[in-house]
Image (tube, helix red, strand yellow):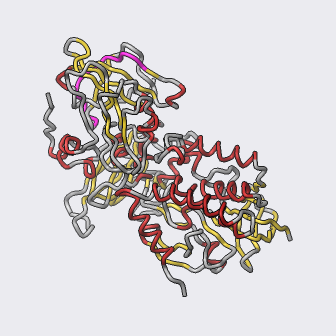
Amino acid sequence: MIMMETKDTYEKGLKITGAPSLDELHASPCYQLPPKERRALAAVIECIEGIPCNPCETSCPVGAITVGDEITNLPVVDFEKCTGCGICVAACPGLAIYLKKYEFKENLSYIAFPFEYLPLPPEGATVQMVDRYGEYVCDGTVLRVVKIKRMDRTTVVHVSYPNDYYERVVNMKRLPAS
Amino acid sequence: MEEREVVVIGAGPAGLSAALEAARAGAHVLLVDENSKPGGQLFKQIHKFFGSHEHRAGVRGIDIGTQLLEEAERLDIEVWLDAEACGIFNTTDVWIVRNKEKSVTVRAKRIILATGAVENSVNFPGWSLPGVMGAGAAQTMINLHRVLPGQKILMVGSGNVGIIVSYQLLQAGADVKAVVEAAPRLGGYGVHTAKVRRAGVPFYTSHTVLEARGTDHVESATIVQLDDKWKPIPGTEKELDVDTICIAAGLTPLVELAFAAGCEPLYSPLLGGMVPWHDRSMATSIPTIYLAGDISGVEEASTAMEEGRMAGLSAAYSLGYVDRETYAVGFDAAEKRMLALRSGMFGQKRRDAKAAIVGHSRG
């Protein structure tokens, strides 16, 4: 289910609000939401401007992301090949990739997103999930906090959250300094 | 008088890359920088860089800086820090003041100017209050000195510098209250604005800062909407509770040394204003003087590094250190990597502006 973005500003798009609108995303060949019936996590990319950049492609161990010879091509994920490993999530300099899966368990979807703020949430914590505008959407439960050397100080936080907000949620609110 | 083959002025990404390339080719290089630490702005770039593998994409600027310094040490490049280049005479003689006390003139066969750029200011009532600063200054405070300039920030300007510094201020624990942009559309990469927006920071396009208020420091700021002629619209003023105003209104190339030396100037509004004319090899109108990085037109650290390689290699070739074929292969590879960075909707304009400089017929 796609949540309608109701505020006027939300419809003005990336170069006005700072965030890509759903209309812009749906019109871009880059953005693909994993189909609800897919069983594994898959990478979702929100990179719609054609900037000269390709670490997503070169970091993918299974060749599931294609930018191609022209470095300004938009990246496209092949869901047939994507294993949902998450290496691209930390490799993207723009922090524009996350993993998603619809209904990983009863009524709950799954997201794994890049997070470069401190403090980090502990596993099991309830956190506030936000949309592309930083607006609170719903609570989520932290499942894993992945911080490995290869990801070079970009933490990837795995969270479960209600299916209703499958497409709208993209990240979590920063936590107050402890 | 001291003599060196190549003197590189400025040890930022462009100067370091130029020095490395010239030294690799076999030239004896002296690298001078007025600061007490080398690296220029690289060591405050804590974010991962864009580009492809050969541009070290995905690596944080701070780590690229460390790699370049390690390489400079391996190649035994002579580095003078706290060394201010004050003038260039007779196309070869660089006047340097060391440690603010000793005046030295170094005769160089080739000089590579990699002096960088300076932040532009925006004037408005209250702009001299403590708390109003360049976005780059705020970035230096948080990432080099680990001091938060304030808790509540207004960012003026939405180019990549304004957006990246906003993000890093959030990471440092500040609250960015708003980003204002005088143009009707945001300037920086959408992936940067998106990560700042999803952190809850509002963007105001067609807005500017009207006034900063406070007794001995910034206590609030007034922003205002602009009409299509960039004039403030009365009645649209909004007061923001901020203690810091960061200005990210572009950069101007630091060209004084080049122009004092007699390098021919050229106006390139897109690349920051007056720049020294240069050819494809990065040579200026004075054949012993080369350029690299923001002094030749404001771009990014990754383009500065490629330009540094091009200038360093060209200088070494002109001294006879590499043969024509080796030069052509190395130069073309650097230029190809450079053109990749100057592509797409953001890069094409810079590519055109650069081509206009190189293609400009002199005299």
Name the residue located 41 percent from the left edge and 45 percent from the top edge. Answer: B166
Instruction: Judge whether B275 appears above or below A20 on screen.
Output: below
The foreground one among A11 and A60 is A60
**Picture coordinates of residue B296 (x, y %)?**
54, 67
Quadrant of the rendered image containing residue B102: bottom right
Q: Residue at x 27, y 22 (%)?
A: A101
Count of all numbered marks drawn on residues in the image: 0
* Quadrant for the C terminus of chain B in the image: bottom right
Residue at image location 75% in from the left, 46% down from the top? B73
Query: Is residue A137 highlighted in magenta?
Result: yes
- B126, above or below B290, in the image: above
User: In the shown orientation, is residue B324 left or right of residue B269?
Assistant: right
Q: Is residue B147 left or right of residue A74?
A: right
Main secondary structure along the magenta-highlighted residues? strand
**Residue B163 % position (x, y):** 40, 48
Please say whether residue B82 is visible from this viewpoint. Answer: no
Q: Quadrant of the N terminus of chain B?
A: bottom right
Q: Is residue A64 above or below residue B124?
A: above
Q: Is residue A28 left or right of residue B300?
A: left
- Asked if residue B334 can be seen in this view, the reply is yes
Q: Is residue A66 magenta?
A: no
Q: Is residue B63 above or below residue A160?
A: below
Which residues are the magenta region?
A: A134-145
> Percent from the top left, x then y, of residue B74?
75, 45
- Quarter-wise, where is residue B126 in the image? bottom left
Residue drawn at x 36%, y 15% is: A143
